[in-house]
Image (cartoon, rainbow, N blue to C red):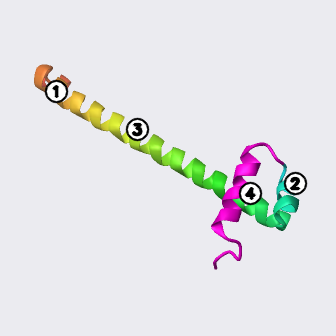
Amino acid sequence: MSSPHPPTVRNQALQLLFQGRSVKDVAVQLGLPQQTVYRWHRTCISQSELMQAHARIERLEGEIAACRHLIDLMKEVVPPKDATR
């Protein structure tokens, strides 16, 4: 289901919210239902959190790969503990 409001109105509403305006003020100024502004804001925050989570996952996967590579290098230099028995 698509929104009856153009994307420019949504972007303008979000910009005003991020400038510190209240949902009520933004809704009145742009002639929108408050619930619509709340939904847009909640969706925007959710997407931002999702992008941050993806970035963190990517960074952690890189760290895991580096640790695995280091473990492989260490196995070449230090014999496994069971090898001394």
Q: Earlier in the sequence, mark 2 or mark 4?
A: 4
Q: Earlier in the sequence, mark 3 or mark 2?
A: 2
The residue under the point 71% across, 77% down is 4
For residue 25, side relative to residue 60 (left or right): right
| Residue where numbered disc 4 is placed | 13
Position in image of residue 10 (x %, y %): 69, 62
Q: Is residue 11 magenta?
A: yes
Which of the 4 image quarters holds residue 20? top right
Position in image of residue 17 (x %, y %): 76, 49
Question: Distance from label 2 to label 1 (Cα)?
Answer: 60 Å
Q: Are marks 3 and 1 in contact (CB under 8 Å)?
A: no
For residue 59, side relative to residue 40 (left or right): left
| Residue where numbered disc 2 is placed | 25
Binning the other alpha carbons within 10 Å of mark 1 as few (below 14), some (14 to 19) or many (20 upward) gives few
Q: Earlier in the sequence, mark 1 or mark 4?
A: 4
The magenta region covers 1-21
Question: Distance from label 3 to label 1 (Cα)?
Answer: 20 Å
| Residue where numbered disc 3 is placed | 60
Q: Amino acid at mark 1?
A: Leu
The residue under the point 84% across, 67% down is 31
Q: Nearer the viewer, residue 24 or 50?
A: 24
Task: Give the SS element for disc 1.
Answer: helix
| Residue where numbered disc 1 is placed | 73
Which of the 4 image quarters holds residue 46? bottom right
Q: Amino acid at mark 4?
A: Ala
